[in-house]
Amino acid sequence: MSMQESELLPIRCSDCPIRHRAVCARCEPHELRLLEEIKYYRTFEVGQAIAWTGDRLDFVASVVSGIATLRQTLEDGRTQMVGLLLPSDFMGRPGREVASYDVSATTEVVMCCFRRRPFEELMTSMPSIAQRLLEMTLDELDAAREWMLLLGRKTAREKIASLLTILARRDAALTLSRGAGPLEFTLPLTREAMADYLGLTLETVSRQVSALKRDGVIKLTGKRGIAIPDFGRLMLETGDDTDGGMPD
Amino acid sequence: MSMQESELLPIRCSDCPIRHRAVCARCEPHELRLLEEIKYYRTFEVGQAIAWTGDRLDFVASVVSGIATLRQTLEDGRTQMVGLLLPSDFMGRPGREVASYDVSATTEVVMCCFRRRPFEELMTSMPSIAQRLLEMTLDELDAAREWMLLLGRKTAREKIASLLTILARRDAALTLSRGAGPLEFTLPLTREAMADYLGLTLETVSRQVSALKRDGVIKLTGKRGIAIPDFGRLMLETGDDTDGGMPD
DNA sequence: CGGGGGGTTGATCTCCTTCAATCAACGTGG
DNA sequence: CCACGTTGATTGAAGGAGATCAACCCCCCG
């Protein structure tokens, strides 16, 4: 899972791991061929900046592998993470020349890039791309609004629990371990990054994680390993409406 | 500004006040004619529910006049406003049968509605609608993320100041009073609604509004009238980065 | 006149921040 | 191999911003 350089450059769209979820998901084979001609890959190291707020951004891209974050900053340096870019997620806004967020690589990140102008032209000529982008943007809007509820109204403990359920669900989806049994996964975020995401301090995050462990809701293996013996129990800690909306 | 019933029903798209900003903004005259055939108007009273989370929602709509809010709720009743629908804003998600939020009318609201199915078909046959919807959705996503920064990292005073700058700017844009001079406008929200939007309690909102008044940042005329002698001064109170990003 | 909705203000409490010390894991250079 | 610095994490003590509970005001309206 870590030697990406070897397999980096010559990926055919048809072999692409994010083929069916990314902005190109709806494309026909002949459309993919057009994309293949103008796409190019870029790799970003751990911690490296991908874009800075206000700077010119001449490409848009899909995350192929790795994790990147979107951040906004106040004048005095307080920061808030406003989005997480995971494999298949899209970065950049057609029609906008300048980045709206600070984007940086949390892990090593490989992106499938398109220069902005040619991509904008494709958008008008290939409705399948515009359609998919709309769908993805609506999903992100829903996610952002769910996060607004978390930031505005949840307690620290509920925030942690919510983040863990999201990460656990995502991990389960990737590893296809649909079965029951204790979920286990590795935290892809430091305590500081978690705090930044949740609108907390890293100390509070650390304390609440410890508290959840003490109460038997989660188990820690090492610093980054998380095991969840009873997912329903964790869900109860999120404060969310349980009865109604199973998302999807 | 209040006797909307008289002029309600027979609006031609070409005379529509939101013609150039709504989801139909990019439509050609012949496309408008198609819309005109299937659109219908609905009016909602002050406080009336427009949609409930989880309930079936068989139409999408543009706000023609009035203000509506989007809310999410936690199990124990804590609520967070996650969006404001103002004239020209769009409600509903093509491709989704069920409402994701509680939508309710803050003032009397007039909406220009389309049954969902026919609208979805129009989206595929009329790219100008899909394009415009994508643009509007991206704008909303930016707004939601800016709100995440506010909810996660700003102090109560900064939150109030931020909300006031937004409302003041919007009002200035509507009344076209671009000139200098003390801005004045009427708060369209109760203290409770403000609190709900800002992730605060109504008491804290009241206190911080009073504090801003005491400090001469704003002046109150009656309960709902706001005057801003020095807009720059108010901006300083928001905590935002002043140098960089003038939005638009 | 009574009542209710919206708003303000006060007293107290509490959850989270702030500041700080400590620890474990890891690498690096002497 | 060990001293040292660094990075991420945990834990403690103190303080504060905002929540909570409660009283009260104002104004409109029935």
Image: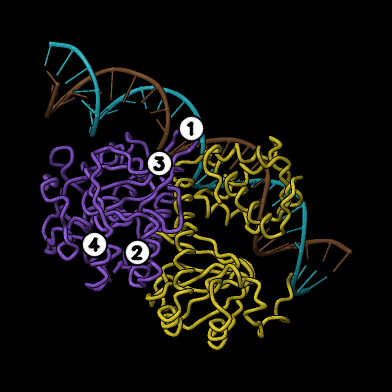
Chain colours: A yellow, B purple, C cyan, D brown
Pointer 2: what residue?
Answer: B136
What residue lies at 54% left-to-right and 42% top-to-bottom? A156
Pointer 3: what residue?
Answer: B52
Residue A239, numbered label: none
Q: Earlier in the sequence, mark 1 or mark 2?
A: 1
CA gap, disc 3 and disc 1:
17 Å
The amino acid at mark 2 is Met
Up the image or down, A216 lies above or below B90; here it is above
CA gap, disc 2 and disc 3:
23 Å
Pointer 4: what residue?
Answer: B36
Q: Using the image as rendered, state which of residue A102 and residue B85 is in the foreground.
A: B85
- Quarter in which the C terminus of chain B is drawn: bottom left
Q: Please tell me whether mark 3 sits on a helix, a strand or a loop.
A: loop
Up the image or down, A219 lies above or below A143; here it is above
The amino acid at mark 4 is Glu
CB under 8 Å between discs 1 and 2: no
Q: Tell me the chain of label 1.
A: B
CA gap, disc 1 and disc 2:
33 Å
Q: Using the image as rendered, state which of residue B97 and residue B26 is in the foreground.
A: B97
Q: Please tell me whether mark 4 sits on a helix, a strand or a loop.
A: helix
Pointer 1: what residue?
Answer: B76
- Which is in the foreground here, disc 1 or disc 2? 2
Q: Is residue A76 visible?
A: no
CA gap, disc 3 and disc 4:
27 Å
CA gap, disc 4 and disc 1:
43 Å
Q: Earlier in the sequence, mark 3 or mark 4?
A: 4
Query: What is the x, y in percent for residue A84?
Result: 54, 61
CB under 8 Å between discs 3 and 1: no
